[in-house]
Amino acid sequence: MPNPAMSIKIRKPETAAAAPAASASNTPLRFRISDLNFYYGAKQALFGINLDVPTNKVTALIGPSGCGKSTFLRTLNRMQESIRHTRMEGEILLDGQNVMEMDVVALRRRVGMVFQRPNPFPKSIFENVAYGLRINGWKGNLGEAVEHSLRRAALWEEVKDQLHKSAYALSGGQQQRLCIARALAVDPEVLLLDEPCSALDPVTTAKIEELMFQLKESCTMVIVTHNMQQAARASDFTAFLLEGKVIEYAPTPQLFTTPTDPRTEAYITGRFG
Amino acid sequence: MERHFEQDLEELKQRLLWMASLAERAVHQAVHSVLDADEALAMTVLEEEGAINEMQIEIDDRVMRLVALQAPMAVDLRFILAASRINNDLERIGDQGVNIAHSALRIVRHPQVKPYVDLPRMSELAEGMVRDSINALVRGDQVLAKSVLARDDQVDLLRDQMFRELLTYMMENSAVVFPAFELILVAKNIERIGDHATNIAEDVIYIVAGRDVRHPALDRR
Amino acid sequence: MSLRTAWRKTVNVVMLSLTGACALVTVSVLFFILGYLVWHGGTSINWDFFTKLPKPVGETGGGMANAIVGSGKLLLVASLIGIPIGTLAGIYLAEFGGRGYSFIVRYTTDLLNGVPSIVIGIFAYSLIVLRTKQFSTLAGGFALGVMMIPISVRTTEEFLRAVPTSLREAAMALGANKWKTISTVVIPAAIQGIITGIMLDVARVAGETAPLLFTAFSNQFWSPGWNQPTASLPVVIYTYAIAPYDDWHRQAWAAGLVLLGLVLVANIGARVILARRAAFLKA
């Protein structure tokens, strides 16, 4: 019997939270990418990419500069189409639907994007968030929808009294959160983030990572980052790309502690190149 | 905005404390199985060893993940590294408890060698050290941790006393050699428990003050 | 000091003074013209000037109401022709153009800009005046409109290009197609610049005289509708200035002052608009 003089009363911790044995094979999938090849003119940038993006998790894409991670990200919402002479082969399925057969406007309503440098429109804060709703013919209460988005982006408290002010009056970190709010306004299922924190300071970066942690319950996220620590901190799954190919794809804790491919290990330990 | 990292740290701490409570209970039960010649109690200790070992593996796993994924700094880093060491000390304390239980099962077949005087005193001291070192961890209490360090010498003295006494008994009466010898082993185990508690206390000081107080005889200049 | 150093120092001082003096001359020319106009024509600026028709030759008094209104009508027609065509062409160049075709369009626009105004007048004359067998506001407006096109194209294109690509990307990522992006993001972002471009464009052609000489011609009276010859400020200045009447001379100075005033207002207004836009974006 435990000694009654024992002063620590401790409850047995739940073992459910112990070791999340998540693997890509037993979670529902938002995107299935098969045999994706991508060409800029004659130059091939992506070679036979196969990847599964799990629903409501954060998937990170890491790799050295020029390995194709941004190119790959942009194929997911067909942003590459605006560049001339690009060609894509292979299949990208969003919830089982081929994205190339979907209406591109409908696709982009379901798959939003946040860019490397904050790029709010030269309009007021309110108009920035409302933009996506307006152009898609939103019939509901605009003010409520804008507030909801700003709350989801953890920006509401800071800007609620100055919605009419220019978006450019905000700091860099706030502008990026505004861009996130703007993307969230149309309630996308997926959010693509292309190095969203590379232009921001560490404190703001931490805020945005925490934001992602809260958002992933309702939104699948794919983030490209050249900062491995960020991928380690913030993602559930990580894919390592090199020269247009996926070298390794695993749950984040596994990839960063026991990677299977020596090239992955070389990159992570900084012995690369 | 509380970061989910803080939650992970808290969960690590909770598991460490749970393991400490298991280890403490194992020691207490093991010693009493000797003092009260209670076979059933000794068996309980042996059965519950598994839980302690499982928790050791889980804690190590968590430590690994926290270091790999979060790149902790300063006090977080010291805590996580110290947690890894405390983890090992607690598991060793559990092992000592198991050893004592095994000894109890063997002693129980023989009549009691002598009235137990030093043994309960020593075990109370050692258990107190374990308890206080863990409390010091919970409260971040350097002073309490230092008091644990001070008591180690007393435990060592008691062990030496017990050795001398039991040796005398063994030399006088060869029939009691076997149980007396087991008692010597038990004393050794309890003294080791005190050492591990001392390690834990040193780790607590490291976490709180950032000072490594092991081996004070070494000149660190 | 050595001869070489002394020489270099002298050259330095001389060039500094020379360039400074030329800069000063440049600035003072404007003020000189302004002062001259005010001095000579300031007295003739009165309520009559803006409301009355010209008096018959030889009589003093009267005003230039018809010329002012005439200029207004001409600029209106010119704007209706020049601005839509120029702006939309500018949008094409900035947003849609392929490499080869854009180059041709830009080059010909620049060439058109360099065509002498009198040649454009002749063009309008043979196209409209000869066919309709009369001078008209329409013909004059057409000539001025053609002159407005190249400037409008270039300024629109420039201000649209100045809008960063990242804004276009952001709009497209939210599901806007190309035209929606242009109309809801790019143009509003460049609108201040485009408007100032238009204002300056109008101010520039407001003073063109040569093409009007054989398109709108002139008119002593009101010009009803759009198919009659019409008076305009530049032509009236021309007519009055070379006439032998002092009163007419003074009125010509006054007209010149009004024209210059229009140009200054347009320029200063343009700067104010652009400055306020910059402040909004920075605030």
Image (cartoon, rainbow, N blue to C red):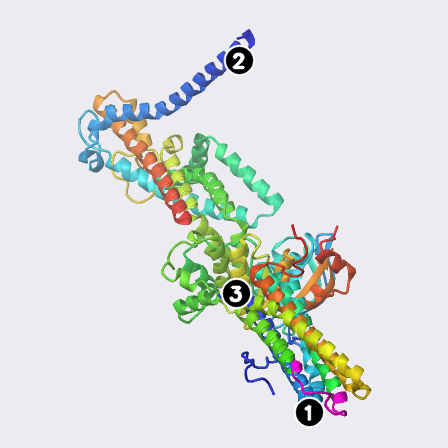
x, y percentage for residue C213?
37, 31
Mark 1 is surrounded, within 10 Å at the Cα level, by few (under 14), some (14 to 19) or many (20 or more) other residues, namely some
Which SS class for mark 3?
A: helix
Taking B78 as reference, is C93 above or below it?
above
Q: Amino acid at mark 3?
A: Leu
Q: Amino acid at mark 1?
A: Asp
Q: Could you say which disc has been placed on residue A211 in the image?
A: 3
Q: Residue at x 63, y 56 (%)?
A: A227
Q: Could you say which disc has been placed on residue C8 in the image?
A: 2
Mark 3 is surrounded, within 10 Å at the Cα level, by few (under 14), some (14 to 19) or many (20 or more) other residues, namely some
The secondary structure that dominates the magenta segment is loop
Q: Amino acid at mark 2?
A: Arg
A239 within the magenta span: no
Taking A52 as reference, is C203 above or below it?
above
x, y percentage for residue A128?
45, 59
Residue at the top extreme, as displayed? C3
Residues shaded magenta? B105-119
Q: Residue at x 42, y 67 (%)?
A: A147
B115 within the magenta span: yes
Q: CA distance from mark 2 to mark 1?
A: 110 Å
